[in-house]
Image (cartoon, rainbow, N blue to C red):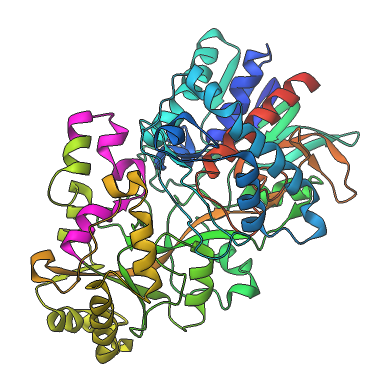
């Protein structure tokens, strides 16, 4: 093992995901020197955000107004706080972060990004629709703005800023540097120490080795922890699993790379930072195993429209309002009561062609590549989009058959399918189809589907014409086995509005800041129990900017 190396800098940023890049770019813009360290090879610059769909939450945006959506900060505040359900003493700073973020999303956020060259798809999506009362969780109106270029598009201007600073010599990037401890002197954090890992040729997202070949030390005026959450560490997810959601799943798939391991949270806590809301987390229940995986247990989330029939593992339809795209956490909570780790969508070819989008930059080559002809073909043309068709052809969780009897037989033959009650499945599908033949219905999902089609954006690119699933003209029939796919931590290092890490006494830990998912996207839990979607990347942007600006001033 080689001897140690030493670096000196104004700001040390631990983690080069979106929050870390934003913080670093703000600091160099303020004239400070910055060093960024990360345990991964440089191919992973940009972190999880690079893999994302690029969804952003705006309030009363030009895109919303052009789509006929009436939004306001008062309506968004009503939705946010009803969704968050803040109910703990620890929620004092998260509440303040939520209020500050709402103003950011309403006022400066969009223009700030536009100045950096970031554009947005004109059709606004309606995620987390809720389906309860006005004071319940969910988005009252569409607010999900897709970045033109998806995740890589939102990361690009900040990568460009740090690489330009690197060329000027004011910023240093140190890949394969794993922090194992924060250094302190006279009660102040003054940097970090850790292992230099062996070089790795792993492609972006793939697991890399952890062989140490040396040590390093960075001395810094201020240190910012922006190392992400715990979603890639399933053992830690299970240890922190909230009792209110029942027993943790025995089987999960991973919506984030293996390096999202939560290791820096314990390091920050040892240096005096207070961790709060660790039992708040955000995992999806529409996960499918990637037929072409990049990282271990690689899962992809389906972003479904509202038409698919959702059945639990036994074949019983999920209760109102747990329809596709309405309440992620409510659906997870319900499914944990069934005793099974999987559920099912049953749908038609017509539904999958219109309503299935797969989350992630690599699953949306039209938006990621800013390819307008491909966009028109994939979103408005006939047939399923190519990435969806690839899962239908190759994915082990997709079953395609011409009639319901053969579909159910194949579902029962899948792992865990023996729990399925064939008669119950037939009852649920046939009963639903009888309802849709009439302009009137007692089926709440059909009513919500018709309501969704009143929104121009849903009618154009997101919802199929209401039809009988068993209509041969709409076939073949499709069943999709759904898994829990881990994604985000909603708790983390408690911070004030400047991103300063707070200790157990409520006072700032001198020299230590946190941003992004490591800080619960701000304050230690800005989302509370639930998230409104489009708020994860936005939380990285907002908390990274706040920490970078404040830390630069503090040096």
Can you say whether 290 is above or below 153 in the image? below
Q: Residue furthest top?
A: 168
- Locate residue 127 relative to residue 279 in the image: left or right: left
Residue 120: percent from left, percent from top: 40, 30
Image-based side of 5 in relation to 159, left or right: right
Q: Residue at x 35, y 85 (%)?
A: 314
> Could you tell whether 417 is left or right of 409 in the image?
right
Most common secondary structure along the magenta stretch: helix
**Front residue of 197 and 502:** 502
- How many numbered marks, from 0 up? 0
Residue at image position (33%, 88%) is 419
Task: Specify start and end residues of the magenta stretch as a single range.
Answer: 348-374
**Any magenta on residue 70?**
no
Please say if 308 is above or below 540: below
Q: Nearer the viewer, residue 85 or 165?
A: 85
Of residue 526 and residue 106, the one placed in the foreground of this image is: 106
The residue lying toward the viewer, choosing from 133 and 25, is 133
Of the 4 image quadrants, the one containing the C terminus is top right
Residue at x 70% of width, y 37% of height:
100
217 in relation to 241, above or below: above
Residue 285 location (% of width, % of height): 43, 65
Quadrant including the N terminus: top right
Magenta stretch: includes residue 367:
yes
Q: Residue at x 46, y 32 (%)?
A: 45
Viewer can see residue 515? no
Residue that extends furthest to the front in the rendered view of this protein = 439
Residue 357 shows in the view: yes
Find residue 476 and report its horizontal and vertical position in percent: 11, 68
Residue 472 locus on image (x, y percent): 8, 70
């Amino acid at each position: 093992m080689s001897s140690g190396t030493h670096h000196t800098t104004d700001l040390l940023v631990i983690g080069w995901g979106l929050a870390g890049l934003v913080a670093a770019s703000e600091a160099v813009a303020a004239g400070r020197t910055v060093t960024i360290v990360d345990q991964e090879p440089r191919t992973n610059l940009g972190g999880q955000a690079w893999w994302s769909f690029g969804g952003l939450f705006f309030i009363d945006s030009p895109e919303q107004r052009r789509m006929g959506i009436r939004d306001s900060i008062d309506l968004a505040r009503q939705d946010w706080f009803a969704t968050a359900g803040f109910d703990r003493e620890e929620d004092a700073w998260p509440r303040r972060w939520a209020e500050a973020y709402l103003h950011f999303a309403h006022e400066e956020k969009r223009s700030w990004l536009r100045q950096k060259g970031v554009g947005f798809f004109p059709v606004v999506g309606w995620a987390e629709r809720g389906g309860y009362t006005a004071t319940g969780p969910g988005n009252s109106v569409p607010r999900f703005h897709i970045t033109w270029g998806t995740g890589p598009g939102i990361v690009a201007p900040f990568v460009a800023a740090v690489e330009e600073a690197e060329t000027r010599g004011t910023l240093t990037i140190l890949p394969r540097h794993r922090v194992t401890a924060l250094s302190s002197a006279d009660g102040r954090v003054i940097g970090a120490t850790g292992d230099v890992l062996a070089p790795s040729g792993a492609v972006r997202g793939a697991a890399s080795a952890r062989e140490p070949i040396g040590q390093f030390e960075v001395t810094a005026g201020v240190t910012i922890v922006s190392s992400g959450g715990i979603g890639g560490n399933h053992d830690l997810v299970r240890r922190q699993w909230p009792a209110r959601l029942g027993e943790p799943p025995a089987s999960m798939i991973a919506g984030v790379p293996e390096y999202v391991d939560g290791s820096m949270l314990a390091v920050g806590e040892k240096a005096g930072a207070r961790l709060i809301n660790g039992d708040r987390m955000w995992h999806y229940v529409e996960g499918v195993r990637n037929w072409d995986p990049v990282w271990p247990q690689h899962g992809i989330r389906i972003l479904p429209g509202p038409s698919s029939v959702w059945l639990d593992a036994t074949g019983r339809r999920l209760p109102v309002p747990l329809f596709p795209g309405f309440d992620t956490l409510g659906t997870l909570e319900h499914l944990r009561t069934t005793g099974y780790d999987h559920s099912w969508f049953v749908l038609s070819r017509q539904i999958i062609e219109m309503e299935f989008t797969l989350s992630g930059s690599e699953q949306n080559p039209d938006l990621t590549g800013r390819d307008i002809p491909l966009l028109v073909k994939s979103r408005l043309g006939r047939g399923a989009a190519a990435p969806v068709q690839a899962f239908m052809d190759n994915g082990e969780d997709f079953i395609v058959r011409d009639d319901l009897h053969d579909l159910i037989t194949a579902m029962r033959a899948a792992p865990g399918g023996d729990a399925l009650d064939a008669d119950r499945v037939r009852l649920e599908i046939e009963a639903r189809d009888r309802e849709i033949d009439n302009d009137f219905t007692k089926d709440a999902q059909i009513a919500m589907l018709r309501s969704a089609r009143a929104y121009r954006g849903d009618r154009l690119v997101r919802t199929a014409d209401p039809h009988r699933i068993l209509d041969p003209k709409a076939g073949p029939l499709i069943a999709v086995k759904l898994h829990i796919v881990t994604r985000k931590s909603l708790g983390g290092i408690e911070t004030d509005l400047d991103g300063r890490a707070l200790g157990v006494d409520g006072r700032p830990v001198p020299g230590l800041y946190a941003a992004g998912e490591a800080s619960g996207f701000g304050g230690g839990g800005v989302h509370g129990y639930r998230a409104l979607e489009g708020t994860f990347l936005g939380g990285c942007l907002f908390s990274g900017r706040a920490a970078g600006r404040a830390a630069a001033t503090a040096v």
